[in-house]
Image (spheres, rainbow, N blue to C red):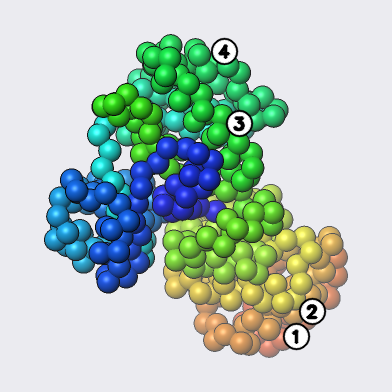
């Protein structure tokens, strides 16, 4: 789960991290109130709030000197959609705009905490090339990337912080501020079950102070049950509507660009199913795992979810019955087909627990559903039918 920048900064404030004062605009009549909550004497920075990077490159971040500039920015973006290199062709809706006090920047740095799966720990990444795409920095100038691993208590040693400070030519005051920021970022990461904390840029002001000019937080979906306050901040409008609906029905769904819908039980089997479709020159439209304990209701919800994608021209169902019974899967498929007017081909491969009963239920349903025993034959059949 992602947070908007302004929401992440609210959390930063709770942990005594230096961020800019800001006002929030979600309705056009809130402009004056938002500006009164900050020092607007020299202007402000207006920022589109959307779950994407690269906003500044498409005009979603603007220096505003007058109220008229702010009004023009709000008119341009509020209620519209922003499209960046990180969004799809439809972009993301803009429901909130923040206005922040100006910061007199001398230098931009990069700071992040990430789950380092290779090292099996949380790592801290630091760079003198702030304000840039960190992947590009790592590729072109890897010597500018500094990295250290947190220990099992999500802490970093004072010696490592001092080493970072020397590499970045911090003075003693800046080193102390840097230590405070890093230690509190580590606390946030642990306390809030984060998978990513990124400050890009972390700036040094002309007065010599360190300041968090931007903030990006990702929360581990699997830990949201113990992060109720953060879960309340979820903005469903920033997520794929099908993926969000899947979460509400306890389904694992990821939208893809193909035209063959997939419904499978088990993540590994789902990956294998998509690979087999690709083997026969087909393109999967989604990853969808109904789980090992799929109920008839969940299968029905999954089927409707697949069919909500207008790009889907055929569906491959691949179920290996273990805990889940194939006859319940068959009943869920029939229920969904009867409820929705389905005019596209459906190929079903059932194996395992009650698979023979499941096949018989499908065959006797009178519906246009093709059954196959082999995954290879099923994948080839649906690819041929779609073509």
Q: Circle 3 is placed at which residue position?
A: 122
Q: CA distance from mark 3 to mark 2?
A: 51 Å
State how far apart marks 1 and 2 are (Cα): 6 Å
Q: Is residue 381 above or below residue 42?
A: below
Q: Under tag 2, what secondary structure?
A: helix
Location of residue 293 by image quarter: bottom right
Residue 270, percent from left and from top: 65, 55
Residue at numbered disc 1: 364
- For the point 26% across and 32% down, which residue is it? 105
Secondary structure of the residue carrying numbered label 1: loop
- 6 shown above or below 262: above
Q: Residues within 10 Å of mark 4 (few under 14, many from 20)?
A: few
- Residue 159 image label: 4
- Find the distance from the CA under tag 2 to the CA under tag 4: 69 Å
Q: Are marks 1 and 2 in contact (CB under 8 Å)?
A: yes
Of the image marks 1 and 4, the number of the one nearer the N terminus: 4
Question: Taking 236 as reference, is 291 left or right?
Answer: right
Q: Nearer the viewer, mark 3 or mark 1?
A: 3
Residue 360 picture location, percent across and down: 79, 79
Q: Are marks 3 and 2 in contact (CB under 8 Å)?
A: no
Determine the image quadrant of residue 141.
Answer: top left
Q: Residues within 10 Å of mark 3 (few under 14, many from 20)?
A: many
Q: How many C-alpha atoms fall within 10 Å of the one at disc 2: few (<14), some, or many (≥20)?
A: few
Residue position for label 2:
360
The answer to which of marks 3 and 4 sits earlier in the sequence is: 3
| Chain-order first, disc 3 or disc 2 | 3
Give above or below for 197 relative to 255. Answer: above
Please identify, in this view, whether the residue under mark 2 or under mark 4 is nearer the observer: 4
Mark closer to the observer (3, 2) = 3
Q: State left or right for residue 92 relative to residue 154.
A: left
Q: Nearer the viewer, residue 63 or 225?
A: 63
């Amino acid at each position: 789960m992602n947070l908007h920048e302004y929401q992440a900064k609210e959390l930063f404030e709770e942990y005594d991290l230096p961020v800019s004062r800001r006002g929030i605009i979600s309705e056009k009549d809130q402009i004056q109130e938002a500006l009164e909550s900050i020092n607007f004497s020299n202007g402000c920075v207006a920022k589109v709030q959307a779950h994407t990077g690269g906003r500044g490159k498409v005009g979603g971040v603007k220096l505003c000197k007058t109220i008229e500039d702010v009004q023009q920015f709000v008119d341009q973006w509020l209620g519209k959609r922003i499209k960046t290199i990180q969004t799809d062709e439809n972009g993301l809706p803009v429901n909130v705009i923040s206005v922040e006090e100006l910061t007199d920047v001398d230098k931009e740095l990069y700071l992040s905490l990430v789950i380092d799966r290779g090292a099996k720990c949380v790592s801290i990444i630091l760079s003198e090339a702030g304000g840039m795409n960190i992947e590009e920095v790592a590729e072109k100038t890897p010597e500018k990337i500094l990295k250290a691993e947190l220990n099992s208590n999500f802490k970093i040693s004072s010696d490592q912080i001092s080493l970072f400070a020397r590499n970045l030519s911090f003075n003693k005051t800046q080193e102390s501020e840097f230590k405070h920021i890093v230690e509190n970022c580590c606390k946030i990461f642990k306390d809030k079950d984060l998978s990513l904390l990124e400050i890009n840029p972390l700036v040094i002001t002309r007065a010599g102070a360190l300041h968090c000019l931007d903030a990006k937080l990702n929360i581990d979906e699997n830990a949201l049950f113990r992060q109720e306050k953060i879960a309340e901040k979820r903005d469903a409008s920033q997520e794929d509507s099908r993926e969000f609906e899947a979460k509400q029905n306890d389904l694992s769904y990821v939208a893809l660009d193909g035209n063959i819908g997939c419904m499978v039980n088990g993540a590994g089997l789902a990956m294998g199913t998509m690979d087999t479709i690709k083997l026969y020159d087909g393109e999967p439209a989604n990853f969808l795992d109904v789980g090992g304990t799929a109920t008839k209701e969940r299968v029905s919800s999954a089927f409707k979810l697949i069919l909500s994608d207008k790009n889907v021209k055929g569906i491959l169902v691949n179920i290996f019955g273990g805990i889940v019974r194939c006859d319940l899967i068959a009943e869920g498929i029939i229920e969904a087909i009867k409820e929705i007017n389905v005019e596209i081909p459906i190929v079903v491969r059932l194996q395992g627990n009650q698979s023979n009963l499941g096949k018989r239920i499908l065959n006797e349903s009178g519906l246009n559903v093709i059954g196959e025993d082999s995954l290879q034959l099923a994948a080839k059949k649906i690819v041929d039918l779609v073509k």
